[in-house]
Amino acid sequence: MSCVASRAKEENDVSLWHYRLGHPNFSYLKRLLPSLFNKDSIKLQCEVCQLSKHTRSSYPLQPYKSSHPFHMIHSDIWGPSRVNNISGSRWFVTFIDDHTRLTWLFLMKEKSDIGQIFQTFNLMIQTQFNTKIQVFKTDNGREYFHSQLESYLNSHGIIHISSCVESPQHNGVAERKNRHLLEVARSLMLTTHVPKYLWGEAVLTATYLINRMPSRVLDFQTPFQSLLRIYPHIHFASHIPLKVFGYTAFVHINQQHRSKLDPKSLKCVFLGYAPNQSGYKCYSPQTKRFYATMDVTFFEHQPFHSKNTIQGESCEEYYFWDTFHSLGSQQTNTNSACLPCLPIPTSESHPTSESLSYLPIQDATQDKNKEVIVYSRRKTQKELEDRITSKLAQETDLSSRLTIDEGNAPISS
Ligand SMILES: [Zn+2]
């Protein structure tokens, strides 16, 4: 192979992994997958990174205080979103373990859901890790002082520390985490022109990816590695090869679900990793259904949504991720950003470096016979707003709340 061709392949592989992992800094990517980079280190630039990370407000770095996992949990709430997620959610809350920086992210339809979500999370920590949350650290948001949550914290001996009024930076760990999450989610959606109503799937996937990325505050370990040092017996639900969010996926239709002349697969958009199954989460706009399966063929060179055919629903506006609360200082910015023309990586690449142990990867063909349909979502905007029929979708969100696969830790903090 000529020198030029070799270099082009190297750049292609690096770009592919940069997309799969949610646009991490190239220096972190090099630490994670050194075999992708030869001695003459290539210098890649990514337009999506510039578009999605260009505003860098600074939060003071707090010294990392080592403690036992789960003794201190940081939390922050984001929302309301300008567009409902497909499940009807308008908010999300994060819980970040101070010691491992492992993060859980839960979508919420209402801010007041925080009380019930925290109780479920606390029970999961007790059952899975045989330890108790001692300190719950938040900003001064009113929802954290909801009577149901307050009485629960009091009755369980959990100390609630909140930042001072109008000083959210005192809740720095959670603030930085949310910012990082939004940066990655924005990158994922911009890369493949994913419509706004799928923002919730993007932040869940961002959480999944960041929990698997090295963090400076953890001496370049990943949050999962940090947890496994103390809880080596923990088995994680999902150990499957990473794919590029928003790309085309063909989901196999089992024989019992089709007649002889029907197509054998369904064209879907890949939207992350199933929370409680070892499978990919794919969505078909045609059937309005989610599918969790390993029996899927990816077209990683082909975004499902094209730049121009998404009904004005793309996530290309800079201010989409600003919530209604924060729009005050942003409303003058009404220009839509042009979506970047990126070279789309076209080849599969599976580095063989030891560092791949950071990323649980196994042969995707091992799990061929899984049932396909797992999720069922509502079909129309009207139905999205129907609280009664929303229960199923809510359960889907709840199930994602209880998996340690839905976490994240900051690269930049
Ligand atoms: Zn990038």
Image (tube, rainbow, N blue to C red):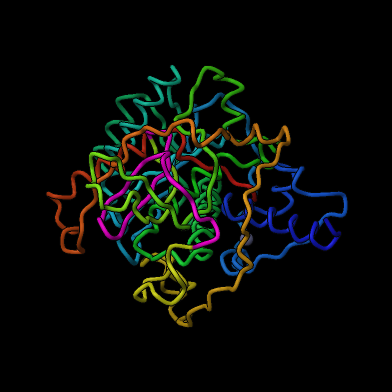
Residue furthest front as drawn: 260
Q: Residue at x 54, y 40 (%)?
A: 241
Nearer the observer, 335 or 32: 32
Q: Is residue 185 visible?
A: yes
Q: Residue at x 24, y 45 (%)?
A: 394
Percent coordinates x, y for residue 3 in the rendering: 86, 59
Q: Residue at x 28, y 44 (%)?
A: 375
Percent coordinates x, y for residue 269 in the rendering: 40, 56
Q: Report the number of discs.
A: 0
Residue 124 quadrant: top left
Nearer the observer, 137 or 256: 256
**Magenta stretch, main secondary structure class:** strand
Q: As drawn, is 119 to the left or to the right of 182?
A: left
On-image quarter of the N terminus: bottom right
Q: As drawn, is 37 to the left or to the right of 198?
A: right
Quarter of the displayed picture in which ligand 1 can be seen: bottom right
Please determine whether, in this image, residue 413 is positioned above or below residue 161: below
Nearer the observer, 85 or 311: 311
Nearer the observer, 250 or 410: 250
Q: Residue at x 36, y 71 (%)?
A: 313
Residue 128 quadrant: top left
Percent coordinates x, y for residue 7 in the rendering: 80, 59
* 7 is within the stretch colored magenta: no
Percent coordinates x, y for residue 237 in the rendering: 44, 30
Q: Is residue 413 visible?
A: no
* 283 is within the stretch colored magenta: yes
Q: Which residues are magenta?
A: 276-302
Please determine whether, in this image, residue 118 is positioned above or below residue 288: above
